[in-house]
Amino acid sequence: MANFAYLFERFPSFGQTFCYREVAELDRQGVASPIFSIRNPKDEPAQEWDPRIIERVHYVPEEKELLNDVRSASKKRKLTPEIVAALDDWGRRTDFLRLYQAVYVGLRLQELGVRHVHAHFAGMAARTAFWMHRFFPMTFSFTAHANDIFAPGHFEIGLDKLVDAARVIVTETNYAAQFLRERFPQPADSVHRIYNGLDLAEFERADFSSTPPLIIAVGRLIAKKGFAELIRACALLAERGKLFRCEIIGEGPLENELRAQIAQLNLQNRLVLSGTKPQREVRQHLAAASVFVLPS
């Protein structure tokens, strides 16, 4: 029997490969925890996911089916009076679906004998886990990443309540861990830094084979990733007569804006937005590059 279950907002997602790698490494070590995902990622670029892991993902139904399922469980007296009262009291207030998702997942984890759930991101999944903890004899923990720490959304179940209720809070950098401990001193001992893992055996040694030298950057095309600054830096290199090529791997809402910037700076023959690629191809590009840039 698994000791805990995972709960994600969406899984697996090509923009959150660190979540997949965590699950895959535990699977390699023989820990096959149940996986629940609130949303089913659709229209995403193909990735080399392990089908055995994908088969374990239980997707929470969308609103109509979800509400019907919980109401049916209530009629069958599977819900405690406290759960029924909480659902009635919350009504259709903001984030009401988190309560129903908590009931849906919680009932199934009870059947599996699972008493702890770990959520990724201090957002939708963690707020659902919060209600699972309230409704069932179940503890929860969550991994907080970036925006969910430094620019959290405004919800009644906010970051403060999540941190107070969680058994463990995980984050990935010393800076983020210290930030959380200083902001929430009472549960500071519950905050732990765990780095995102990489299997370095999958990476080739850099051979610097690209001619002219290749600059590589990887990430979603959004403002905080800093790709506009990278493009401006490439313009400076071009002005100084340096030979280079630059490739930005990824997609996102700023694609057209970045393409316009590339054209305005006359970098079309030097800089390319190549879209998303499978992880294997990303590693190959990294091996051929002379420089990897992380402009965020």
Image (tube, grey):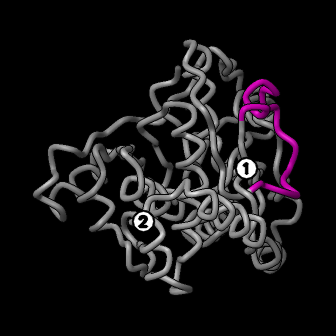
Q: Which amino acid does label 2 sit on?
A: Pro
Relative depth, front residue between 214 and 2:
2
Q: Which labelled disc corresponds to residue 59?
A: 1
Local crowd at mark 2 within 10 Å, few (<14), some, or many (≥20)? few
Measuring 58% from the left and 50% from the top, which residue is drawn there? 105
Measuring 76% from the left and 35% from the top, which residue is drawn there? 279
Q: Which labelled disc corresponds to residue 203?
A: none
Q: In which image quadrant can residue 130 be found?
A: bottom left
Does 258 sit left or right of 105 as displayed?
right
User: How far apart in space, not on screen, are marks 2 and 1 (Cα)?
Assistant: 27 Å
Part of the protein shown in magenta: 40-56
Residue 269 position (above or below residue 85): above
Q: Which amino acid does label 1 sit on?
A: Tyr
Q: Mark 2 points at which residue?
A: 81
Measuring 49% from the left and 64% from the top, which residue is drawn there? 123
Does 207 sit left or right of 116 as displayed?
right
Give the foreground label among 2 and 1.
2
